[in-house]
Image (spheres, rainbow, N blue to C red):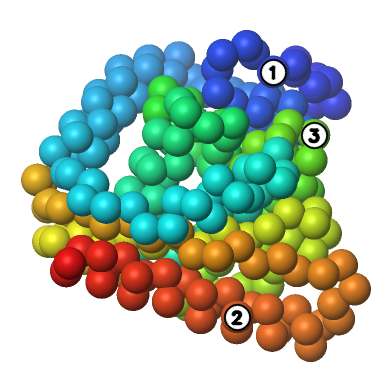
Amino acid sequence: MPVNETRPNAPGDGGLRGGLYGQVSISSQRLKPGRRLLYRIAAPFVTGLVRLWWRSCRFRVVVGAEHLDAVLARQPSFLPVYWHQHHLFCAQYLLAQQRTRPLRVGFLISPSLDGELGAMIMRRLGGHVIRGSSTRTGALAMKEYFQALMREQVSPVLNPDGPRGPRFKCKPGAVLLAQLSGRPLLPLAYAASGAWLVHWDKFVLPWPFARIALAIGAPLNVPRGVDAAGVAQYQHELEQRLHATFRAAQAALRT
């Protein structure tokens, strides 16, 4: 397929196939047959493992679900935001809400060959895949996010500290995207009764059968006319709201 040709969305595949990243990952970096076969075997295995992990843990309480309902009542899409370390169960919660709410959740997956496995897994879990890299192709990733929000009505997940940190520090991308799109930022966090903390950011990997409490904070809207100093203030405000949302999840777990 030529690089300048755009593939239409495949019905039911849960992925956004159009745009630059779909072309880069599928066209110019074709998987070799051996790796493709390996990924096709690994994807259902890993998907099953993730689902088993999710099912072994129990959601004790969800705090602030009314904020999600209020956002969806006003806008067809929004910007879910949580720290990278909270990905496992914040993602699980959002994916589960697609069954009962008018919600389509998107996830940024690297356009590299290695990212193809992650894309396969996310589609199996019901997520909508956006191919891109926040570190290597930040401006183009922003464009893909914007198109997903406005054209596809997908709510793309944002990890404002990014895959490389610094931990618990918001980069400007989330605020800028909210400003550009007019869509609200919705903070999420979860706490577990027991968990391993792994990797640089203390990624939270709950123990099997742990109790989970998830909190959703009030949405944050960023006006279009905000200048650079204002963007920095909103970054700080988003950090504070994410910390407060995590404290709310911790408190709910103790009650």
User: Mark 1, residues whose alpha carbon is within 10 Å: few (<14), some, or many (≥20)?
Assistant: few
Residue 118, image x and y in percent? Answer: 44, 35
Residue 57, image x and y in percent? Answer: 16, 44
- Where is mark 1, residue-wise? 9
Residue 253: quarter of image: bottom left
Q: Is residue 64 left or right of residue 197?
A: right
Task: Kindly give the residue lying farthest to the right in the view shown.
Answer: 225
Residue contact between numbered discs 2 and 1, judged by CB atoms under 8 Å: no
Q: Please state, as top left, top right, bottom left or bottom right, where the N terminus lies in the image.
A: top right
Residue 247, image x and y in percent? Answer: 33, 75
3 vs 2, front mark? 2
Q: Is residue 227 above or below residue 67?
A: below
Q: Nearer the viewer, residue 38 or 255?
A: 255
Q: What residue appears at the point 14 percent right and 61 percent down from the top-left corner?
A: 193
Q: What residue appears at the point 31 percent right and 21 percent down from the top-left corner?
A: 44
- Where is mark 2, residue-wise? 237
Q: Amino acid at mark 3?
A: Arg
Indicate the secondary structure of the residue bearing disc 2. helix
Q: Nearer the viewer, residue 191 or 168?
A: 191
Q: Is residue 79 above or below residue 123?
A: below
Q: CA distance from mark 3 to mark 2?
A: 28 Å
Q: Amino acid at mark 2?
A: Glu
Q: CA distance from mark 1 to mark 3?
A: 13 Å
- Where is mark 3, residue-wise? 151
Q: Is residue 251 left or right of residue 180?
A: left
Q: Nearer the viewer, residue 179 or 170?
A: 179
Q: Upstream in the sequence, badge 3 or badge 2? A: 3
Residue contact between numbered discs 3 and 2, judged by CB atoms under 8 Å: no
Q: Amino acid at mark 1?
A: Asn
Q: What residue appears at the point 80 percent right and 54 percent down from the top-left corner?
A: 181
